[in-house]
Each structure stands twice: as C-alpha cells, then as structure tokens.
C-alpha cells in the first residue's frame, strides 16, 4: 500500500490528498471519575473549555479534512453550540459515545465520511496538542499504516504483585504514548472489532492494532501534550498556557 501511495503522489498531487484524507475523531465521552466532580471536557482552561482547545488545534491543522466528536449524550447540545459559536467548520458530526472507550471510538469510526482513508483518534481532554505533533503523526501513519506520539519515561518503573516488586523493566525501552493515534481506517476498524470479539482489555487504540500483530510506529511527542485526568493536571495546563502568554 505504501508503494502505491508513493507512486500516486508522484504522478498526481490531488490524488495524494484523497489517498491521505484524514478525519480527526475526538473522543470526549468519559465520566472524569478522578476529577472530584469537575467535568474535565467542559472545564474552564484559560478562558475556554478544555474541549475547545483540542477542537481548535484540529480545526487549524491542514492535514485534517474533517472532524467527528464523540461525547456523552448530555453534552451533545453543548458541544454543538460550542462548535457553532467558534466557527469550527470541520466538525461534521457530533455523536454519542458507547459504554466503553472502545465502543465510543467505534461510534466515531462509523460516522466518518466515505472519503476517509486515515483517522487521527484524539483524547478530547488533551488540549495542548500541537500542530506539529498532529502533522508528524499523520505523515508517519500515511507511510506505515499506524503511528502515535510518545515520550520517553523518566522515572524507574517497577512491576509489582501484592505490593512486592517482581521486575524492573529497562527504562530505555519504556515510552508514554499520547494522542493523536493515527491509523489507516480499515486497519483500526478491524483491530477494534477483533478486540471486542476477543474481549481484549484496551487502554488505548494502539493496543488493538498490536493485538493483530501489526506494527505501530512512534514519533516524538511532548510533555506539554498532557491529558487532563486530575484537578492538578488542569492547574498545570493553565500554568503552561500562562507561560505561553508571557513569552
């Protein structure tokens, strides 16, 4: 597939655009159990809801042709209004999520347009994602079929059983994987459906592709590309944005 895409790119630039048509699937349907009652998706971050920061990053990225938002049923109208008020023209559909993250991602995949060849699956609560990370990950996925940003783990990680350390993995081989995780559409659809059928527990979408025996390639992420999971994360993200304003 990569060879054919390269040949097509050299012959016809317009064909390249269609072959690489990428839809952003923004997953914003979690319950935020660790946020002490704060709805992290709509929480205020430097004057804007967390989700809006994420959506605007994808709206501005030239490698993203359209956006599908997957959110909770009770937030659909609020998200629709958010998109209208902020001229988010790439947002084509806003759909309710499922019972699990995997169910929610599959709902998003069912809603992408027929032109979609690649999907960039993004946590809605990862508001500081940069244009460069989005673009670089998409470009890598176009070449390889599957890619994700990641950063090297700095702490020593221990594997424990019953509160007793049983293993210390080599830190040089450990990476914290972020989003967007970008895949060829047919690949991620097959991987997630297979994972559901086999009842494979997933913490991210890369895991489903790995379970098929397929390779996922990493690109350089950023410590700033953090996920809002706790109230402390929200405070840290605010400080990072304040630093941007000062500089």
Image (spheres, rainbow, N blue to C red):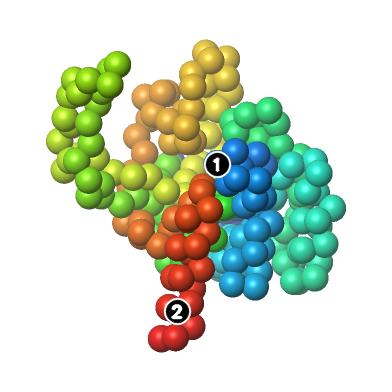
Q: What residue is pinned by disc 2? A: 244
Instruction: Assess disc 2: are there few (<14), some (14-19) or many (≥20) residues with their C-alpha within 10 Å of its C-alpha.
Output: few
**Residue 14 shows in the view:** no
**Which label was assigned to residue 34?**
1
Q: How crowded is mark 1: few (under 14 residues within 10 Å), some or many (20 or more)?
A: few
Q: Is residue 221 above or below residue 48?
A: above
Q: Is mark 1 on a helix, strand or loop?
A: loop
* Residue 51, label in figure: none
The N terminus sits in image quarter: top left
Residue nearest the observer in this picture, 223 or 10: 223
Question: Residue 156: x and y, percent?
Answer: 19, 41
Q: Residue 223: where, in percent of width, then height?
A: 35, 59
Q: What element carries label 2?
A: helix
Q: Which of 232 and 65 is in front in this view?
A: 232
Tell me which label, 1 or 2, sits earlier in the chain: 1
Name above or below for residue 87 compared with residue 227. below
Label 1 or label 2, whichever lies nearer to me, is 1
How far, Cα to Cα, is label 1 from label 2? 27 Å
Task: Where is residue 149? Give x, y as percent.
Answer: 38, 51
The image position of residue 42, as x and y in percent, is 69, 57
- Residue at image coords 41%, 86%: 247
Residue drawn where x is 74% and y is 42% of the image: 72
């Amino acid at each position: 597939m990569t060879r054919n895409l390269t040949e097509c790119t050299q012959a016809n630039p317009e064909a390249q655009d269609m072959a690489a048509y990428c839809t952003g699937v923004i997953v914003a349907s979690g319950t935020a159990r660790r946020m002490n009652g704060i709805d992290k998706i709509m929480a205020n971050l430097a004057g804007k809801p967390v989700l809006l920061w994420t959506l605007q990053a994808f709206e501005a990225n030239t490698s993203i042709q359209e956006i599908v938002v997957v959110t909770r049923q009770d937030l659909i109208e609020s998200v629709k209004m958010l998109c209208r008020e902020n001229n988010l023209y790439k947002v084509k559909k806003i759909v309710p999520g499922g019972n699990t993250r995997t169910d929610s991602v599959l709902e998003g995949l069912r809603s992408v347009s027929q032109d979609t060849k690649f999907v960039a699956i993004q946590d809605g609560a990862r508001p500081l994602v940069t244009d460069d990370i989005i673009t670089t990950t998409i470009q890598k996925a176009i070449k390889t079929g599957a890619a994700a940003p990641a950063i090297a783990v700095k702490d020593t990680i221990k594997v424990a059983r019953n509160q007793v350390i049983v293993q210390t993995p080599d830190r040089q081989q450990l990476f914290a994987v972020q989003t967007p995780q970008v895949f060829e559409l047919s690949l991620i659809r097959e991987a997630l459906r297979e994972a559901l059928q086999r009842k494979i527990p997933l913490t991210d979408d890369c895991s489903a592709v790995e379970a098929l025996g397929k390779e996922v390639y990493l690109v350089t992420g950023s410590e700033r590309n953090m996920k809002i999971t706790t109230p402390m994360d929200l405070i840290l993200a605010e400080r990072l944005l304040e630093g941007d304003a000062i500089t």
